[in-house]
Image (cartoon, rainbow, N blue to C red):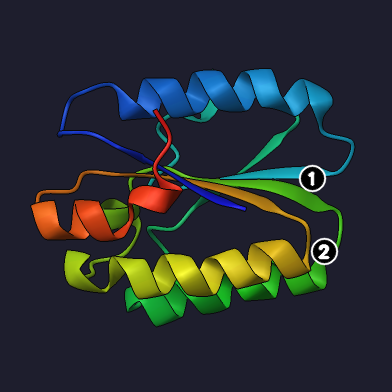
């Protein structure tokens, strides 16, 4: 299952993601991975959450991030949750292709029984409508 947390820049999405991750990790028997562009929030995350800072990975577009997620989940069947904070900071991509990316990720998450939660700042109203089925309050 893929979930998308959207809001404007500075609306508190990162705080929500960190708070939710710290709550959710208590119920996770496997691995919990938190992906963001830097490690600046590492001290705020529960020590049982594996932080992956992508700044040195040089992920290219949706395909790069998709491959990265597929690689993680296929190499470690114990990953139960993946949180990706600040999608457009993790990879430089166009909003217009977000729906296709989320659909592809949803198939992977269902196959490996991994919940994926993503936060993003979306500007395009049409894209917001397209991805509505993934959006969480």
Residue placed under numbered mark 1 in the picture: 31
What residue sits 82% from the left and 64% below the top?
76
Task: Examine the rendering and report whether any part of residue 18 can be seen.
Answer: yes
Q: Is residue 14 above or below residue 86?
A: above
Residue 135 versus residue 50: which sits nearer the camera?
A: 135
Is residue 117 rendered to the left or right of residue 38?
Answer: right
What residue sits 39% from the left and 20% below the top?
15
Task: Name the N-terminal-most of marks 1 and 2.
Answer: 1
What residue sits 34% from the left and 67% below the top?
99
Q: Is residue 79 above or below residue 107?
A: above
Residue 119: which quarter of the image?
top left
What residue sits 63% from the left and 21% below the top?
22
Dot 2 falls on a residue whose secondary structure is loop
Residue 101 x %, y %: 41, 71
Residue 109: which quarter of the image?
bottom right
Residue placed under numbered mark 2 in the picture: 76
Residue 91 x %, y %: 31, 64
Is residue 47 rendered to the left or right of residue 104?
Answer: right
């Amino acid at each position: 299952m893929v979930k998308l947390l959207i809001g404007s820049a500075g609306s508190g999405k990162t705080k929500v993601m960190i708070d939710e991750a710290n709550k959710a990790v208590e119920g996770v028997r496997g691995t919990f991975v938190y992906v963001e562009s830097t490690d600046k929030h590492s001290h705020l995350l529960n020590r049982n959450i594996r932080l992956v800072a992508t700044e040195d990975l040089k992920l290219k577009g949706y395909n790069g991030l998709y491959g990265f997620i597929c690689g993680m989940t296929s190499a470690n069947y114990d990953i139960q949750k993946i949180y990706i904070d600040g999608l457009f900071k993790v990879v430089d991509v166009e909003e217009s292709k977000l729906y296709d990316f989320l659909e592809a990720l949803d198939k992977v998450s269902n196959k490996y029984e991994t919940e994926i939660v993503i936060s993003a700042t979306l500007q395009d109203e049409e894209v917001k409508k397209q991805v509505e089925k993934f959006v969480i309050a």
